[in-house]
Amino acid sequence: MNFWGRPTGSSTVSWKYQGSPWEVVRPDDGQPATRHAVRCRVCDKELTFTAHSVAATRRRQARWRVGAWGGLVLTVATLVAVVTGSAPWALLALPFAVALAWNLGTAAAEEVGVTGHGNGVPWSMPKHAITLADQRPEDLPELVCSRCGHQEHYRWGSHLREGYVREQYQAARTRFERHTCR
Ligand SMILES: [Zn+2]
Ligand SMILES: [Zn+2]
């Protein structure tokens, strides 16, 4: 996807993007990551991205999660220090600890195993981003209301743990059952 910003006021920018499909085969588990060049159809730039195997992608997700838990521990520790008044600097550190936990947690959820040009890096707003257009699991059909066309989305993809996808699907199905047509 190519993102670009346009000023829509004195201090705001609106972002638009245009996606283009790109097919790339991941390396097998245990094989090193591979580099692939792709030309952006919007700005004509040649970009090189690195594709990781499924196993390596899950390891990357796990690393972000460890970081996110660390951020959470730090958040709790600074919160305790704020409440007890034992460390005067804790109030300043608290927003950083919260931001750390939040950003690393988001990075874990959004890691697709394709890196380069800021893709998948927390705190970065990449102009070019990779999202997966994967094969939907066959036994988890789309949740679409036949009357109003409302669709309940859930996270899925071959880079995610199967158990996780099933949890997401169950949650989406519960939401779908409660759906009322507008
Ligand atoms: Zn571009
Ligand atoms: Zn409906």
Image (cartoon, rainbow, N blue to C red):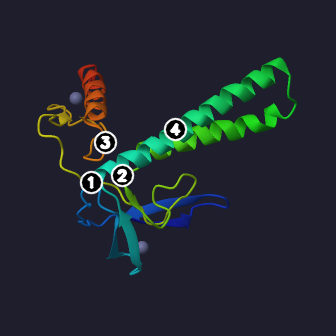
Considering the numbered disc 3 on the image, is that residue within a helix, a strand or a loop? loop
Kind of residue indicated by mark 2: Ala
Q: Are marks 3 and 4 in contact (CB under 8 Å)?
A: no
Q: CA distance from mark 3 to mark 1?
A: 14 Å
Mark 2 lies within 8 Å of ligand 1 (Cβ measured): no
Q: Earlier in the sequence, mark 3 or mark 4?
A: 4
Q: CA distance from mark 2 to mark 4?
A: 15 Å
Considering the numbered disc 1 on the image, is that residue within a helix, a strand or a loop? loop
Circle 1 sits on which residue? 29
Number of residues whose C-alpha sits closer than 10 Å to that of mark 1, classed few (under 14), some (14–19) or many (20 or more): few
Image depth: mark 3 or mark 4 in front: 4
Considering the numbered disc 4 on the image, is that residue within a helix, a strand or a loop? helix
Q: Are marks 2 and 4 in contact (CB under 8 Å)?
A: no
Kind of residue indicated by mark 3: Leu
Which residue is the extreme one toward the front?
A: 30
Toward the viewer: 48 or 62?
62
Circle 4 sits on which residue? 66
Circle 3 sits on which residue? 160
Residue 100 rendering spot, x and y as whole percentages: 62, 42
Kind of residue indicated by mark 4: Val
Image depth: mark 3 or mark 2 in front: 2
> Which quadrant of the figure has residue 182?
top left
Image depth: mark 4 or mark 1 in front: 1
The structure residue drawn at horizontal position 30% and vertical position 47%, both measured from the top left corner, is 159
Circle 2 sits on which residue? 56
Question: Is 33 on the left or on the right of 181, as rendered?
Answer: right
